[in-house]
Amino acid sequence: MSDVARLAGVSHQTVSRVLHESPSVREETRERVLAAMKTLDYRPNSAARALVTGRTRTIGVISFDTTLHGPASTLLGIERAAHEADYFIIIVSLRSFTRESVLGALERLRDQGVDGIVVIAPHETAVAALHDLPPRPPVVVAEAGPDTLSVVEVDHFDGATQATRHLLELGHPTVWHIAGPADWLEAQRRVAGWESALRAAGAPVPPPLVGDWSARSGHELARALLDRADLTAVFVANDNMALGLLRAVHERGRSVPGELSVVGFDDVPEAAYFTPPLTTVRQDFDEVGRRSLDVLLREIEHGAPLLARVTVPAELIVRRSSGPPPAGKGR
Amino acid sequence: MSDVARLAGVSHQTVSRVLHESPSVREETRERVLAAMKTLDYRPNSAARALVTGRTRTIGVISFDTTLHGPASTLLGIERAAHEADYFIIIVSLRSFTRESVLGALERLRDQGVDGIVVIAPHETAVAALHDLPPRPPVVVAEAGPDTLSVVEVDHFDGATQATRHLLELGHPTVWHIAGPADWLEAQRRVAGWESALRAAGAPVPPPLVGDWSARSGHELARALLDRADLTAVFVANDNMALGLLRAVHERGRSVPGELSVVGFDDVPEAAYFTPPLTTVRQDFDEVGRRSLDVLLREIEHGAPLLARVTVPAELIVRRSSGPPPAGKGR
DNA sequence: CCGGGCGATGTGAACGCTAACATCGCGCCC
DNA sequence: GGGCGCGATGTTAGCGTTCACATCGCCCGG
């Protein structure tokens, strides 16, 4: 910077002013400085700036498996929004949901000096670890969190309700459910939404089966489920497990939706090409990411927790895996 | 830091020494300093450290769509390895593969002061933009790059050859190919491997169809392809397009592998649950990520480009979508 | 004609750390 | 017993910014 100043015949402060587009620099000097910067290929040193301002223009994102469609899409939404706001994203991925793991990630990010943190870890233990955090830096939670922090989440309850109601309206006497892991908050919400829709319709509530989100687990659970004679409709807590279920149904030589209706959750890009194309509930992960960053940026500016609660709607996408129950099995 | 020094009754330099585990600090003083740090909840300021050392312990990763299985897995591999080496990952995602976009990302990261960069952008234009970069910071390219930089990639050619040979050995007279976009390097390599296997076997080389990696495009291209009477085997350049193809085949009421054999590429976690379970070529993305970081770290330490070429093997995973051709159609 | 005010610029310090060198005892060897 | 070397610690400077304040013309109004 001092080199630039010397070359332009001004003080370092004036160079700084030009950098910040301060209005109180004469046009002529401004151009002289700009020219000097160019010929010297000057680049401001972000570390020096961070040192004095206390801001790094950096946001930390803590996420579990970024290979999963949901977190990956949310992350992308955050990144895009951050880019636009001229922030960088530092990503830390969790290997497990233990309290230590989550707190450790938070600590690391904090030590690195991020201006704010988004946590994508919709898990009981992880969320529990988020109570009583120090006020700085601000933390926003995407996809379910504690009520001590700002939370941006999809309306899982409503999504599950829509899915269940859709099946009920097609005439199914009831709807079975393959749920996500019990300690995942979104899995819990979906169970609750499903159950509520069932009760509202006066339909019996069968015991939910519990999977681990993988196609494999959907496949395995389906095998037990398919033995039941009264089974006509299943709401599966995500598309991957639904795929496993579809596979199992096919192996039994049963038809979807002729003999069994299936509805998933997520609307992964491939869902439309499953056999048959999957009726599912779309989550706008991208929007979750964008809104999360939005809230976080506002908290950074505001200097204090906003305790915002943003809910992103879920949307039922009807495709070909759901239809009326087989003759004689409706209600 | 000076607060800690004062409390411990030493100079700030001694505090720094304790921080760096310098051997020349008496055990007793070391403990005194450690205690002071603890009571003051002292945290070293990374910006200040970066300012004086010129190192940020930060690695930039430039990637295209981090929502895709490949890049996402590679990214995860990089992140894990970085974590282990005590580095942070800053991620920048590209919206397009234009030269400006790639160069802009590089520039941004450089200005931010990252110690090194990994580029995941196996695309002609993107790779072309990577020629003639400034030597600092070091850049490593994952999944195909120019020969002026270190490259870590899966052996696409060999993977495609294995897939094609597998089908040929089952007795198919030839193998059709649904390729990825022509300007993606990995798509090119797979075409080359497929063609080479065909020629080596003396089989005719049908014109490859070109998709865009999506299930949708696989579905569309399949419709044209399925009109051909002589079609018995298709090698599809990725699992998503293969899913679309499978869907199209099903819609025509044809059977896989009875009437048509299909082999994909990637081995996404769901491939085993497609209908039928997909024979495909597994890419170890995680390994690509790890090795990329490995090379990059070595370059950072070494201070100069290593021009390493790391090839990660591809592995054919035989499942149920491939079998012998229908009677009378073999060779 | 002079003081006030304002626009344009400069000066010095501070941010929190590390690197290089300086200092100070103390034991050891000849 | 005096110098040497070494282990333990302190001192000083500097990394590249920004911030707060100082300075300096110059125009304007009374």
Image (cartoon, coloured by chain):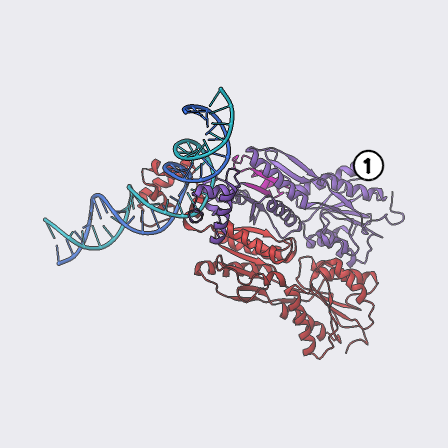
Chain colours: A purple, B red, C blue, D cyan
Residue B257 at x, y percent in the picture:
77, 67
Is B224 within the magenta?
Answer: no
Asked if residue D10 lies left or right of residue B249, the reply is left
Residue B169 at x, y percent in the picture:
71, 75
Image quadrant occupied by the C terminus of chain B:
bottom right
Residue at the bottom extreme? B202
Q: Residue at x 64, y 65 (%)?
A: B186
Sort mark 1 into few (<14), some (14-19) or many (20+) by Cα contacts within 10 Å.
few
Reply above or below: A176 against B255: above
Quadrant in which residue A155 is drawn: top right
Residue named by callout 1:
A202
Asked if residue B60 lies left or right of residue A328, the reply is left
Closest to the observer: B192 or B7?
Answer: B192
Image quadrant occupied by the N terminus of chain B:
top left
Asked if residue A25 lies left or right of residue B37, the reply is right
Quadrant in which residue B180 is drawn: bottom right
Reply above or below: B209 against A218: below
Query: Looking at the picture, which amino acid does disc 1 mark?
Result: Gly
Reply above or below: B329 against B254: below
Instruction: Report the span colored magenta.
Output: A116-143
Callout 1: residue from which chain? A
Reply above or below: A152 against B298: above
